Amino acid sequence: MRIYQGASLMLERRRFGYRRIWQLLRREGFHVNHKRASRLYHLSGLGVKRRRRRKGLTTVRLPLLRPVAPNLTWSMDLGMDTLATSLTCVDDFTKEVSVNGAPY
């Protein structure tokens, strides 16, 4: 009788999970071990299916262009930025550091 009662509760409320089914059985007066409720729940194939995460849209990544001469491309260097007011830029060709437009 206990197994039939538990199976009927599981089929009525598929999204509850074995722990809530176990609590409902205990409230109704059936003293069932939580491990048995879990085993019956999973053997019945009633596990709640997890939702899959949506994959992000794939974008075409272009390779970075190599500079052929100085002063063509500059990059922000966040590792060397010590002050919030200073702007640290690095020339990609010569690796020369410039703070606020003054090359060193």
Image (spheres, rainbow, N blue to C red):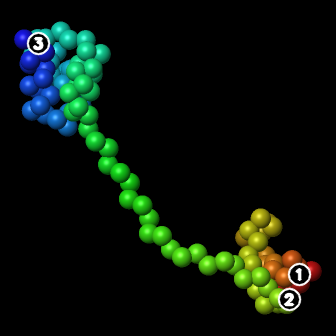
Q: Residue furthest right?
A: 104
The picture places residue 14, in percent across and down from the top left corner, at 16, 35
**Chain-order first, disc 2 or disc 3:** 3
The picture places residue 78, in percent across and down from the top left corner, at 74, 68
Q: In the drawing, what numbered circle is on residue 70?
A: 2
Which quadrant holds residue 88? bottom right
Q: Which amino acid does the dot numbered 2 rest on?
A: Pro
Q: Is 68 on the left-hand or right-hand side of 85?
A: right
The picture places residue 58, in percent across and down from the top left corner, at 48, 70
**Chain-order first, disc 3 or disc 1:** 3
Q: Which amino acid does the dot numbered 1 rest on?
A: Thr
Q: CA distance from mark 1 to mark 2?
A: 6 Å
Q: In the drawing, what numbered circle is on residue 2?
A: 3
Residue at position x 9%, y 18% from top?
A: 4
Q: Is residue 80 visible?
A: yes
Residue at position x 8%, y 25% from top?
A: 8
Reply above or below: 86 against 30.
below
Q: Is 92 on the left-hand or right-hand side of 8?
A: right
Q: CA distance from mark 3 to mark 1?
A: 79 Å
Q: Is residue 34 visible?
A: no
**To which residue does mark 1 refer?**
94
